[in-house]
Amino acid sequence: MNAITPARAFDLIPDRFDTFVASTFAASKAGRHVRDRLIAQVDGGRLDHMLLRARSGLTTLSHDVNRKAALNIIDFAFEPLVMQGMSTDQTIRYLGAVEKMLHVREARGLDGFGPLWVDTIHHVCVFSVLFQLAAFLGKTGRFGQVILLHQGQRPEPRLRIMVDLLRRAHGIALVLLQLQGRWFPRLAQLTTPSTAIFYLTDMPPEAFAQTVRKQRAGSRLLLSHDGAGAPLEVETVSGSQSFARRLGAARIVLDYPSTDSVRIRPVGSEEAATSLCPLEDWLFWPVLGSTAQKPAIAQGYSAQQ
């Protein structure tokens, strides 16, 4: 569950902003100074060739959106450094603050019977939202276990923090299951009617081997933006439809119709998911220069659905 795609091919993309940011933080222990220096480079125009406007080809994007997209990547990389220095109470307040930033526009599909499969995406607030959702599901009394499927390509301290906090503060067991080897039989063994499974579905096809692309059904992500024209449509690779059906799990999508809202909605067992997110809040926007994208064709979908 990393903002930086683990596929080797992605690491070779020239001038990829999130890779540049991550390596800059990794090269120094002075996180706050690194953040300030990166923001100064963005504001000084020295990184324009890496930023969203150049990467997406949307020359009509406003300066504010272009800058916000860059700051989102910087702060997402800075966040784990900050969280590791927080006390338990500070961390719980920090993760809970997302409720003041994002209001729940819609929440359906949480009251069914049996295991729950949650499709979500790499949004700038994804860790906070998933923590709050896990806590909410635990409070309903129906779910005592949450399984988070993750790539596990590099250490992610936020996952360790979430495991500890959910156990101590809410009595919820968060199981981290890496998507390698015979992970699905292990998932099937762990899954009970009181299990919720979090799965991120916005990995572009280039992140997977050709054989995996053929085995997994396609899904898509609609990215709204303030430029002229329709939202960008990005093809993604997801096994949710098959995996949830094999587990007998009810399936919901957690997406972000706008910068200040989230939406939880059910999706049919035979339906390919379409997720929504503002372009600048999607943490994979640095790959847009290499992955297929196109303006979304009007088929009853809207960035404000």
Image: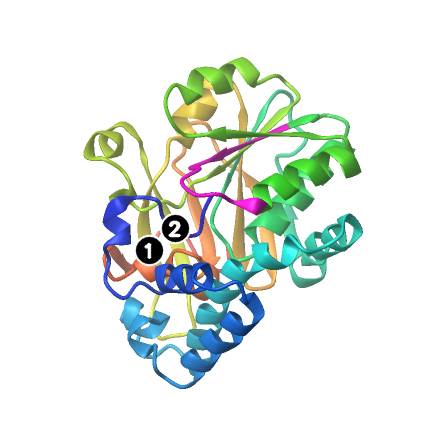
Mark 2 crowd level (few <14, some 14–19, many ≥20, 10 Å Cα): many
Residue at the extreme bottom of the image, as rendered: 44
State the residue position of label 2: 221
Tell me what residue is drawn at x 72 percent, y 25 percent. 142
Using the numbered discs, state the Cα–Cα distance from disc 2 to disc 1 in whole angstroms: 6 Å
Q: Nearer the viewer, residue 234 or 78?
A: 78
Residue at the extreme left of the image, as rendered: 210
Looking at the image, do the residues carrying marks 2 and 1 touch, with CB atoms under 8 Å apart? yes
Q: Is residue 278 magenta?
A: no
State the residue position of label 1: 233
Q: Position of residue 18 (x, y in %)?
A: 39, 61
Residue 296 visible in the displayed image: no
Q: Position of residue 99 (x, y in %)?
A: 70, 56
What is the span of residues highlighted in magenta in the rendered image?
146-157
In the displayed structure, would residue 132 be above or below residue 17?
A: above
Tell me what residue is drawn at x 48 percent, y 66 percent. 74
Q: Nearer the viewer, residue 64 or 44?
A: 44
In the displayed structure, would residue 87 be above or below residue 192?
A: below
Mark before the other along the chain sequence, 2 or 1: 2
Q: Is residue 154 magenta?
A: yes
The type of residue carrying mark 1 is: Glu
In the displayed structure, would residue 167 be above or below residue 9?
A: above
Tell me what residue is drawn at x 50 percent, y 59 percent. 77
Would you say 113 lies left or right of 188 here? right
